[in-house]
Amino acid sequence: MARVFNFSAGPSALPEEVLKECAAEMLDCNGTGQSVMEMSHRSKAFEPIIQDAEAMVRKLMNVPANYKILFLQGGASTQFAMIPLNLGIKTGKAAYIKTGVWAKKAEAEAKKLGLEVTTLASSEDKNFTYIPRVEKVTGDYDYVHITFNNTIMGTHYEYIPDTGNIPLVADISSCILSEPLDVSKFGLLYAGAQKNLAPAGVTLVIIREDLITDTPRPGTPTMLTYKTHADEGSMFNTPPCYTIYVLGKVMHWIEKNGGAEGMKKRNYEKANLLYDYLDKSDFYHATAEKGSRSIMNVPFLTKYSTGAKDDASVAKEKEINDAFVKGATAAGLVNLKGHRLVGGMRASIYNAMTLDGVKALIKYMDKFAAENK
């Protein structure tokens, strides 16, 4: 069967070149006669793999020397707890900007762990279809948390809030290395790998060294303490070795394709093409407001998504959406079903998605619209 165009929000498509390299090395990686899946994480065979992955992250993201790079487990969701446990120790106060489902979950976890949480701004009034402007933050907060790209809602920060001396923390799971980002403006960045970096299984954390404490909040488990992992080079326990190996391969693919700047050019070309089509269409429309649109996740609705709640309208909308997804799948365009909180469809066009994939999607959308007007 031919390769499909995979628009999944995550786990997402990986570069075909990387998949082929991994397949070629499945039984013998670097002349060791074994797969990375079988290697001891403390072996001489694995050591250069994790070192290379870390070095490539530092190089491609221009990570300053006073930041640690950690390969952790538990997904970005575990970071919702690790951040308040490790950073919320001076005043016990934290500030969050609420821009979607994952931002809400992060904020709720901080409250659950006993922090005094302030919601600086929220876009919930319009179902998270925009990013609120918070230019300057002051106060005695231990940190300020934002979700830089909102996978479900298709929104993205086009600015970085000025938090002064307050550490700025950002979830960049669904936009990491999609474009350049000034790491020095943040105290901590974290990303689940399964969008732009690797298969699910590893979470990348980039943390400024002064934020790594040996006295987190009382009762913090050893595994949820950043110092535990920083002191052991992410080797306190067995890390997700194979996922780290694939991450390293993806880093080299990004470098070969122009680094973060190359990804930005690639991604804006794809996103602009799709948004331009949506904005000119009388059948489809994007859900995110201009000025807040993600270049990674593009939710869209048809003209039948009117918001009406009567049985006939709901049934018609579901019929059209189901037909769209079914037809797209048959055409080799998979995982386009929208999240239930937005409805309609969603095209996730991460780094590995090609321009040809977006063009194929638009061609299908045109055909479907003509057939269903």
Image (spheres, rainbow, N blue to C red):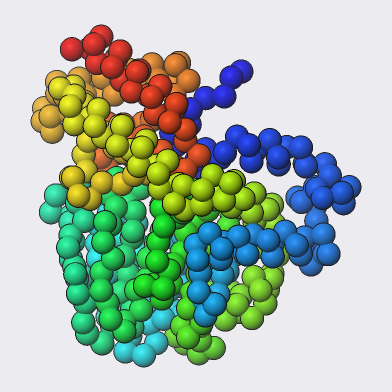
**Point 40% across, 61% down: residue:** 181
Left or right: 18 with respect to 64? right
Residue 72 location, quadrant: bottom right
- Say whether residue 73 is visible: no
The N terminus is located in which quarter?
top right
Q: In the figure, 355 relative to 193: above or below? A: above
- How many numbered discs, if any? 0
**Point 45% across, 26% down: residue:** 356
Give x and y (percent) for residue 271: 33, 38
Residue farthest toward the top in the current orientation of the protein: 371
Q: In the figure, 78 relative to 32: above or below? A: below
**Point 47% across, 78% down: residue:** 208
Give x and y (percent) for residue 311: 15, 24
The C terminus is located in which quarter?
top left
Left or right: 270 with respect to 372? right
- Say whether residue 88 is visible: yes
Left or right: 282 with respect to 153? left
Give x and y (percent) for residue 121: 18, 66
144 and 102: which is toward the camera: 144
